[in-house]
Amino acid sequence: MADLKSVPVLVPVGFHAAARAALQERFDVRDLTETGLDGLSPAERQEIRAIASFGNVSAAMMDALPGLQIIGSFGVGYDSVDAAHAAAKGIMVTNTPDVLTEEVADTALGLLLMTVRELPQAERHLRAGLWEAKGPYPLTTGTLRGRTAGIMGLGRIGMAIARRLEAFGVGIAYYNRRRRDDVAYEYHDTLEGLAGAVDTLIIAAPGGASTDKAVDARVLEALGPDGILINIGRGTTVDEPALIAALAAGTIKTAGLDVFEKEPHVPQALIDLPNAVLLPHVGSASLHTRAAMGQLVVDNVTAFFSGRDVLTPVPECAKAGVPLHA
């Protein structure tokens, strides 16, 4: 392996501990604190050649680091990184797909079961002593039996969710930017059309301008009063005020959410709804999976500066022909 100790890498304070330690062993790690680039002198900004990040990396931030060559983003979604700007400047951006696919798909199915069978509410019934004092939790009106799920975003995670749904005997349809020729699932070319054809809508799509508030009042209306919405993609994909209104009015039956528009803030109106199951963005949050994600960030940055091709370049950089190594 090449001697990488002379390569300054900017790493946020609070970054995955094991990944940070691995980067520190190999590179000249510089701290990115809450003050952002204001905490670096002009000379230090000139020196930075890489960022390992799980947060926002804007065009302005890239422009302020003239020596920047690669951004190793922690997560499969990278909408917080201006990848188009990076590609235009010849800066490589990598993400961490595949290693979190199964964990997030597991979470999606867990959230669906929690939502459709009211499992959190039933647990609260027991913990409050109501089973003994007042009797069994009421029979749930929801069940997976006879349901059809529509998946928004049939990529790696969407496919992993589909495989699990098949095992549960749930019918599957999907909406994508384009039809896949390697699956037999029913395809819909509009999200509203998909919602109208199913009773369970699962969002596994990335964030960004193309999906911003795509699940709006019309889509929720199409999903209908027996409809269940599950979101393990990005919170920005859902129009939160429209969802709150739909849940309150019975326009849809219930929702299970692991992601929100302005995390970690969750609207109080959403918290107060009895027909919503809410998780604090834990889709990939196991020690096993986060370690694999952190290691992939390390492996990408190491490969880049060692003269080897990065493992997981994002499509914007691949299409623009950004060099895969230094």
Image (cartoon, rainbow, N blue to C red):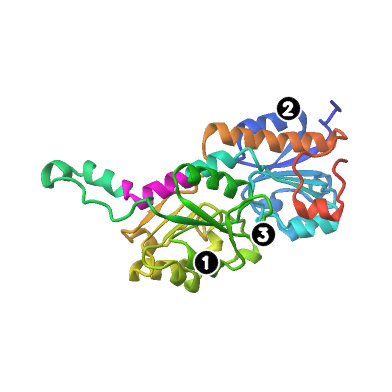
Q: Is residue 259 left or right of residue 67?
A: left
111 inside magenta stretch? yes
Q: Which of 215 and 70 is in front in this view?
A: 215
Q: Nearer the viewer, residue 299 or 179?
A: 179
* Crowding near the residue tagged with mark 1, few <14, some 14–19, many ≥20 C-alpha atoms within 10 Å: many
The residue at the point 49 percent across, 41 percent down is: 106
Give the vertical position of 217 relative to 308 (above or below). Answer: below
- For marks 1 and 3, the one nearer the N-term is 3
Image quarter of the N terminus: top right
Q: What stretch is highlighted in magenta?
A: 108-119
C-alpha separation, residue under disc 3 versus residue under disc 2: 45 Å
In what element is the residue under mark 2?
helix
The residue at the point 67 percent across, 50 percent down is: 182
In what element is the residue under mark 1?
loop
**Residue located beneath label 3 in the image:** 179
Q: Is residue 165 left or right of residue 27?
A: left
285 inside magenta stretch? no
The residue at the point 33 percent across, 59 percent down is: 275
Furthest residue in direction front, as rendered: 184
Q: Is residue 128 left or right of residue 225?
A: left
Image quarter of the C terminus: top right
**Residue located beneath label 2 in the image:** 25
Label drawn at residue 53: none
- Of the two numbered discs 2 and 1 in the rendering, the one whose residue sits closer to the viewer: 1
C-alpha separation, residue under disc 1 versus residue under disc 3: 20 Å
Q: How many marks?
A: 3
- For marks 2 and 1, the one nearer the N-term is 2
* Crowding near the residue tagged with mark 2, few <14, some 14–19, many ≥20 C-alpha atoms within 10 Å: few
